[in-house]
Image (cartoon, grey):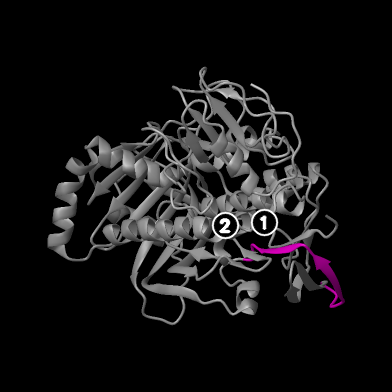
Amino acid sequence: MSDPVLIVGAGPVGLVMALELARYQVPVRIVDAMTERATTSRAVAIWPRTLELMERGGDGLSAELVGLGNKVTAANMLADGKHLARVPLDEIETPYPFVLMLPQSETERVLLAHLQARGVEPELGVSLADFTQEGEVVTATLRQADGSEATARYAALVACDGAHSPVRHRLGLVFEGDTLGSDWAQGDFHLSGLPFPVNEFATCLHAEGPAVLFPLAPGRCRVIVGLGPSTTDAPPPPPDRAGFQALLDRRGPGGITLHDTLWSTSFRINERQVENYRVGRVFLAGDAAHVHSPAGGQGMNTGMQDAVNLAWKLALVLRGLATAPVLLDSYDPERRAVGAEVIATSGRLTRLATLKNPLARHIRNTVMPAVLGLAPVRHKLEGDLTETAIHYRDSPLNGISWGAGPRAGDRMLPADGEPPYGVGDTPRFTLRAGPGAGAPPGDLPAALVYPMVRPHAVAGGIQLIRPDGYLALSVAEGEWAPITDYLARLGPARSKGVSA
């Protein structure tokens, strides 16, 4: 392996992509046309599954993020100022039973510091002028801020360059979907009078449109408001502080006072997804591949998880540890399915919050408390929001599933006190086996599998868990042949070293 991977876009998705590849000892070059980093908050929510995956780096990244943010553990629903329901977010089995509220500028600062610690420095003021690909080589021309250009070879190109992705346009990929016909605004404010603790957020439903309150810190909050149907070609400017205050007075629980505006913007909601996340050795991740409603705050998280999914597969291939085409082929179907589900879920939440028909609103407000009081419904909503319900059950990478336990493609959590799945400088699979499994075969590839077999967390059987913490396959005790065959099909170079 000699050519680096070129990452276009140095926002959260590009930074995670570079960080994961650098951890896996894959040379990277990351560029962005921006000349300096934004200091505004933009995305503010980091969900549990993202923190679980970031923990795999072994460098304290998740702990550092958690130490900087506000841990929110419940969501409140109001209608016309009256409390309808409270949904806890801490019933999910995870080391991070909360949504972490942290301004995107802070998230980027932490990611950047960890990337620099691995010897990689993003190049700002550098844009992608053009690229071509032939076989397994991408040839890209980069333009410096002074207009000078240079062309070089790369092993792959990963487009993390946003909703208006030049890479996507250059590939001619269709960004299928629609723009919703309504205007929205959001802003960060210092305020007082919130009737909820700082660890709870609130969605306030109203005939005019919703108002959502995300607490960032004591006395500081993100406010999102619907402005009504679009009547102009572009979104109108966001309201001033008095305008936001008037909307909250009408829609909120009352008693809230906005003191000053830290940042505000207006926007329209796009629900779009690219037809294919991969063309040869060019891959799309984050907003370059999917955009959707901010309801649920999952955009940044979904993009960061795109990067995690792709990085371990690309590292195995580029380091020559696995050669099966299915590794890179699996990125598109796995992540496109997740993107489609996020678009659908956030769209449903948006439409539910913006009902205009009085009868429909009455039914919603009447039924919602009872429905959210049902444990299965509440847990389904929690799993969708926290992204802990994400699975790859239809992945082409899946092997067989044994017994009544987890199915291939399901998220797996390590036992208490165990390191996360996928730690280290090589993307290895983890074996779990019950006491009756017997010794593993001596020819399991040590380049692909951690050298020690972890004891089975619950009962018998053997499980093979992917570097990103999803189950690859499971078999009954003693049935090592399917494990051996699965790893052999990935095409690794064989070397011994796995032990019970």
Q: Is residue 146 magenta?
A: yes
| Residue 360 visible (yes or no) | yes
Residue 100 x %, y %: 51, 40
Which residue, given by chain and number where applicable, does mark 1 sit on? 14
Which residue is at the far top?
435
Which residue, given by chain and number where applicable, does mark 2 sit on? 331
- The three-letter code of the residue at mark 2 reads Tyr
> Is 422 situated above or below 437?
below
Residue closer to the observer: 264 or 392: 392
Residue 196 x %, y %: 36, 37
Q: Quadrant of the N terminus?
A: bottom right
Q: Looking at the image, which residue is at 73% across and 40% down?
A: 426
Q: How busy is the neighbourhood of tag 2: few (under 14 within 10 Å), some, or many (20 plus)?
A: many
> Is 199 situated above or below 306?
above
**Range shown magenta:** 145-161
| Residue 217 visible (yes or no) | no
Q: Could you tell whether 40 is left or right of 37 in the image?
A: left
